[in-house]
Amino acid sequence: MTESQAVHLFLGLAVILGLARAMGALARRFGQPAVIGEILAGVLLGPTLFGSRLSGVVFPTEVRPLLGALAAVGVALFMFVVGSELDLGILRGGGRATVWTSLCSTVLPLVMGAALAWALVSSPHEGPSTGFVLFFAVAMSVTAFPVLARIIADRDLAGTRVGAIALACAAITDLLAWTLLAVVVAIATGERFDWRPALLVPYAVLMVTVVRPLLRRAARTVPEAEPGGRAGNGNFLALALGGLLVSAAFTEWLGLHYIFGAFLFGAVLPRGTDGGLRDGVLQRVEPLCGTLLLPVYFVLSGLKVDLSRLNASDLGQLAAILAVAVTGKFAGAYVGARAGGLDGRHAAALGALLNTRGLTELVVLGVGLELGLLDAKLYSLMVVMAVVTTALTGPLLGRILPATTTAGAASAEAVTVKSASAGTPTRPEPRNVPPQNREVTETTSR
C-alpha cells in the first residue's frame, strides 16, 4: 500500500464513519431504523447528486479495492451474526399461523418476482436467463430478520403473538431465501459442469453433525475464572472468528459465495447452556462490524447507485418493482395469517412487518451485481425498493396497530415464542447487541 493509498484509505474511513453515524441518527429522529440513514449516506456520496466528482476525490479508484476488502469482511461478519441469531428450533413446529404465514409470504413473492423478471427484460434481450429469474424471485422474497426484531422491540410487540409469529416467519423465510440464493449462485456460475457446488449439502451436514458438537465441547472447556467470565474468553473468540473465515473461504471455493459459509458457521455456534460464549463473541464482533465495516459496504453500494439518469420508463419499472415487492409480501403474509387463524388486523400487521428488508436485501443485491445478474440501473432500482419497503414498515404498522392499542395487545396477547415457535423463548430485541451499537446492528438482522 502506497503512502497516497494509506492517506486516502484512513480519511475515507473517517468520512464513512462520521456520515453514517450522522445519517443514522437523523433517520432515528424520523422514526426510521438507522440502517435507512446509513444506506442513504452511501447514495449521497455516489453519482446520484454529485456525479463522479465527489466520490472520485474522497474515494479514488486505487483505494476502492482496499475498501472492498474491508466491506467483504464486514458482510462476512454480518452474515455470521445473522446465522448466530437464527434459532433453528423455530423450525420444529411453530403452530399453524407460523407455518401458513411463512409459506405464503415466501411463495407469493417468489412467483410474482419471477413473473416481473420476465416482464422487465422482455424486449431488448433474447429472454431472461434462468439465473436472473430465480435471483429476482429470491430478492423479492427476502425479509430482514434483525431490522424486524428491532422494530418489534420498539413497538412493544415483543412477547405478543404477532411479534412471536413475525420473528419465526422471518427466520424461516431468511433460511429459505439463503438456501435458494445458493442454488441461484450455483446456476449463475455454472457455465460448465463443476462438481464443487454439490459439496454444499454434505458440508452443511458436516457442520451440524461434527463441527457444532466440537464447538460445544470447546465451549465447555473454557475456564470460568478468566477475567470477564465465560463470555469474555478470547480463545473462543479467536476460534469462532477463525472458523467463520475458513468456512467463508470454503464456500467461496465451492463456487458459491463466502456469505453462505459465514452464515452457516454462525448458525452452528453453541446455544443453550453454552450460549454465554456465543453472546460474548457477538458482543465483540458487532461493534466493529456495525459501526465501521458495514457502513463501508453501504458506501460502496451507494457508489454504484445512480438515480440521476432515470427516465419515465425507468420510473415505471421502479413503480412495478415496488408494487410487486409490497403486494407480494403483504398479501402473502395476510392470506397465510388468516388461513392460520389470525384476525384481519393482526394478519395485516404481519404483512407490514414482513415487508422489512434492510441490509439483508442489500447483501442479496450485491451478490446479484457481482455475478452480473443485475446491471447498474436495475441494481439502483432494487436498492430504492429495499429502502422504501423498510421505511414503510413503521408507518404502516402505526396505522394498523396504533400505539394506544399496542400496550393492550401486549398484555392481552402476551405469549412466548414457545407457543409460536416450539419452545424457543423470545427476547424483546436481538440479543447480544451492545446498547451503543443497537441502532446499527438492527441490520444484523439481518
Image: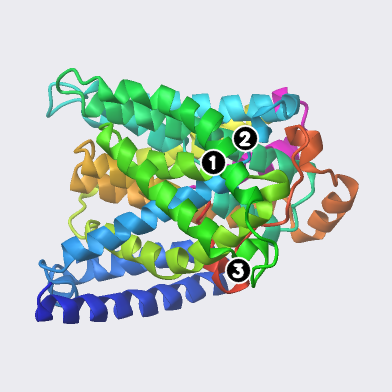
Percent x, y of residue 69: 25, 59
Query: Residue at (85%, 47%) from the top-left corner?
Result: 414
Q: Is residue 391 visible?
A: yes
Query: Residue at (33%, 31%) from the top-left corner?
Result: 135
Dot 1 amino acid type? Ala
> Circle 1 — which element?
helix
Percent x, y of residue 230: 66, 61
Helix, strand or loop: magenta stretch = helix
Q: Which mark is residue 88?
A: 2
Percent x, y of residue 399: 67, 53
Position of 147 compared to 196: left or right? Answer: right
Of mark 1 and mark 2, the one earlier in the sequence is: 2
Q: Are marks 1 and 2 in contact (CB under 8 Å)?
A: yes
Mark 2–mark 3 distance (CA, rounded to whole Å): 23 Å
Nearest the viewer among 24 and 355 is 24
Q: Are marks 2 and 3 in contact (CB under 8 Å)?
A: no
Q: Is residue 118 visible?
A: no
* Neighbourhood count class around disc 2 (C-alpha, 10 Å): few under 14, some 14–19, many 20 upward: some
Position of 5 compared to 312: left or right? Answer: left
Q: Which mark is residue 73?
A: none
Q: Quadrant of residue 404?
A: bottom right
Q: Which residue in the protein does label 3 denote? A: 434
Q: Which mark is residue 267?
A: 1
